[in-house]
Amino acid sequence: MPRMDEKVETIYHDVVSRNPGETEFHQATREVLESLGPVLVKHPEFTGHKIIERICEPERQIIFRVPWRDDKGEVQINRGFRVEFNSALGPYKGGLRFHPSVYLGIVKFLGFEQIFKNALTGLPIGGGKGGSDFDPKGKSNDDIMSFCQSFMNELYRHIGQYTDVPAGDIGVGGREIGFMFGQYKRITNRWESGVLTGKGLDWGGSLVRTEATGYGAVFFVEEMLKARKDTFEGKICSVSGSGNVAIYTIEKIHQLGGKVVTCSDSNGYIYDEKGIDLQLMQQLKEVERRRIKDYVQYRKHAKYVAKGNIWEVPCQVAMPSATQNEINGSDAAKLVKNGCIAVGEGANMPTTPEGVKIFLEAQIAYGPGKAANAGGVATSALEMQQNAQRDSWTFEHTEKRLQEIMKNIHELCYETAIEYGTPGNYVNGANIAGFIRVAKAMVALGVV
Ligand code: GLU
């Protein structure tokens, strides 16, 4: 572990003891706080205003029962969460995650990261996150609708276009956003498009939102490569996951001349040395909602490795796009040894602290999630802009805006890392630049 500034260390210990058992939240705060010592030296006013202490405490945390009836008529109970973390820069903004692993510690780590990620976009959005321990895997469409409606029956009173604007995350895509939007409209009798993002294109959604997290992460890596006078052209790339982020990461890498040879789900991974056939993958995952092992039925030369370790596959660029802590220290060491020169995180916090240390020491181009995957939420903010204007932009225009935003985030992180004496360290760059934006607004808004 890198050494933490003494003042900051005390705050971190306080966070741990005030939030027992929330290991992912501890990990996420530690990662940001480790970067902040030098910021307090340059900005002593942040200490006086107790900005770090305040930023680590969510403004509001909502936990609620989600009772629903499944398609066999049986009553089911899940737990729902919305953590409204920080609204200094705009309404709370962040996704909803439906996954059995969800508990308060996961929602808080995601909400905490979201504050800084959203600040990096330069758009007027605060940070929040929510979700449920509901497991959508294998559920019928009716089950999904019943659950989403019940979830919204409580959530609706906490959200609104000027208050809190949820979106998707793992387990929540266009279908779920549709069911939740329908229920919100029914309860409130308001067609309030700006209350949720990731909506369908016929009812207030934005072009490029579906592609945005993946495309944005690739644009970020493209910028990191450019800073090293390199490009994606001819690069062998490894992508994990097979959801929305992974699929559009693969698409954009292929457009830029790289070759993605892997993807995965929670059961195993695919290795396709000729490059992942994206159309086939989209048909299996997005249309038929099948598991990726079926890919090899159609691409005979490809290999499916059940329960294998995807990071053993040699690659030059790795883009973890599945979930938190999917790359540990030994995976990171393997990647570096096998010639990996760039890592761009499409998922949130996919690398453990040990892994991050290895990437930084090896001085490869390492783009942490809160910078690299900010394109998704940035395009959500563009969706909010279009909703407010009752307008819809073209694909080309929206993609261009996304690319500019990713370029700006890269430049901001790159320059901030230099300013604080750690050139090339995008972890420090992202943490410091994101923090300063929020901290300045918090100082201006007073003790609230
Ligand atoms: N869940 C996404 C993220 O991790 C997107 C959130 C949003 O669009 O509000 O940033």
Image (spheres, rainbow, N blue to C red):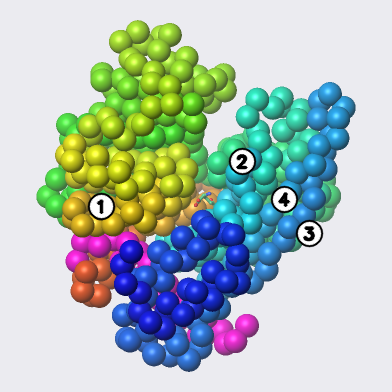
Left or right placement of residue 221 versus residue 94 in this view: left
Q: CA distance from mark 2 to mark 4?
A: 11 Å
Query: Which mark sits nearer the N-terminus, 1 or 4?
Result: 4
Q: Judge whether 313 appears above or below 353 on screen.
A: above
The residue to which callout 4 is attached is 80
What number is the disc on residue 157? 3
Q: Residue at x 22, y 69 (%)?
A: 422
Between marks 4 and 3 in the image, the one whose residue lies nearer the viewer: 4
Q: As shown in the figure, which amino acid type bears the numbered disc 3?
A: Arg
Q: Residue at x 43, y 90 (%)?
A: 45
Q: Secondary structure at mark 3?
A: helix
Quadrant where the C terminus lies? Answer: bottom right
Q: Which residues are magenta?
A: 423-448
Q: Secondary structure at mark 2?
A: loop
Q: Residue at x 25, y 44 (%)?
A: 333
Q: As shown in the figure, which amino acid type bears the numbered disc 4?
A: Gly
What number is the disc on residue 359? 1
Q: Secondary structure at mark 1?
A: helix
Q: Judge whether 237 appears above or below 38 on screen.
A: above
Left or right placement of residue 202 versus residue 281 in this view: right
Query: Which mark sits nearer the N-terminus, 4 or 3?
Result: 4
What number is the disc on residue 99? 2
Between marks 3 and 1 in the image, the one whose residue lies nearer the viewer: 1
Tag 4: Cα neighbours inside 10 Å, few (<14), some, or many (≥20)? Answer: many
